[in-house]
Structure formats: C-alpha cells, structure tokens
Image: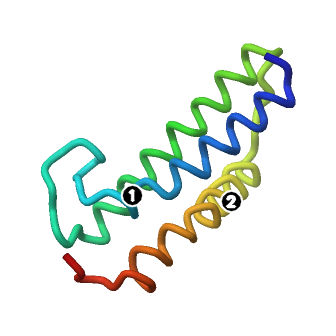
Amino acid sequence: MDSEAAVWLVLLTAAVAANLPYFSHRLLLVGPVRRPKAVGWRLAELAILACLTLALGFALEARIGQRHPQGWEFYGAAICLFITLGFPGFVWCYLRRGRHEA
C-alpha cells in the first residue's frame, strides 16, 4: 500500500469511527441497548475509537517506513480533527432526531 492510499484509509476510518457513537444505542457498540444512552458513554466510545484510529495510522506509518515521533501539537490537532469529523453524527443524534426519541 502506498502512502496516499494509507492516508485516505485513515481519513475514511476516522470519519466512520467518529460518527459511530452517535448512530448506535449499544454500549461500546456491542453491549446492551440503552435508550437514551448517556453522554458519558458517547464520549468514552469517542475516545476509544479515536485511540483505535490513531493506532491504525501509526501501524500504517510503520509499515510504509519509519515512524516519526510526534509532539503534543500533533495529538491536539488529531483530537480536534476527530471531533470535527464526528459533527454530522452529533447533529443527527441531538439536533435533528431529538434527544429522547425512541
């Protein structure tokens, strides 16, 4: 896999993973159904999926070549990008569909 395909794969994975907590009523995406699911669970799922996406990016970077050390600026930008990618799911879950709709 070349570097361009790896970048697109990580971006696509991040876009899907950032929206998953908002489209699922299951705890940690596989647990029991909770309606309505608490905001804390959604934030925990978002953090876990962000870490998994970051791990995928690191693995692809290591496979292509040498991994470069990153500073706090990289992680700050990555978190902001992940939250921004999750905005459509947030809008659908809380603003469009309603908070307590069954």
Locate residue 36, reporting x and y percent.
20, 72
- Relative to 12, is 24 on the left or the right? left
Please tell me which residue lies in front, 84 or 58.
Answer: 84
- Checking the image for residue 21, the label placed there is 1
Mark 1, Cα crowd under 10 Å, few <14 / some 14-19 / many 20+, is many
Locate residue 11, reporting x and y percent.
70, 44
Q: Which residue is drawn at 30% across and 66% down?
A: 40
Locate residue 100, reporting x and y percent.
23, 82
Does residue 100 lie above or below 5 as drawn?
A: below
Distance, label 2 to label 1, CA atoms, is 16 Å
Q: Badges 2 and 1: C-beta atoms under 8 Å apart?
A: no
Q: Name the colouring of the figure.
A: rainbow
Please tell me which residue lies in front, 24 or 71.
Answer: 24
Does residue 1 lie above or below 97 as drawn?
A: above
Q: Residue at x 57, y 39 (%)?
A: 53
Q: Label 1 amino acid?
A: Pro
Instruction: Looking at the image, tell me whether mark 2 or mark 1 is earlier in sequence order.
Output: 1
- Relative to 64, is 23 on the left or the right? left
Locate residue 42, reporting x and y percent.
35, 62
Quarter of the picture containing the C terminus is bottom left
- Checking the image for residue 98, the label placed there is none
Element marked by disc 2: helix
Q: Label 2 amino acid?
A: Leu
Q: Which residue is drawn at 31% across and 71% down?
A: 39
Where residue 13 sits, quadrant-wise, is top right
List the residue tagged with mark 2.
Answer: 81
Does residue 73 lie above or below 91 as drawn?
A: above
- Relative to 18, is 81 on the left or the right? right
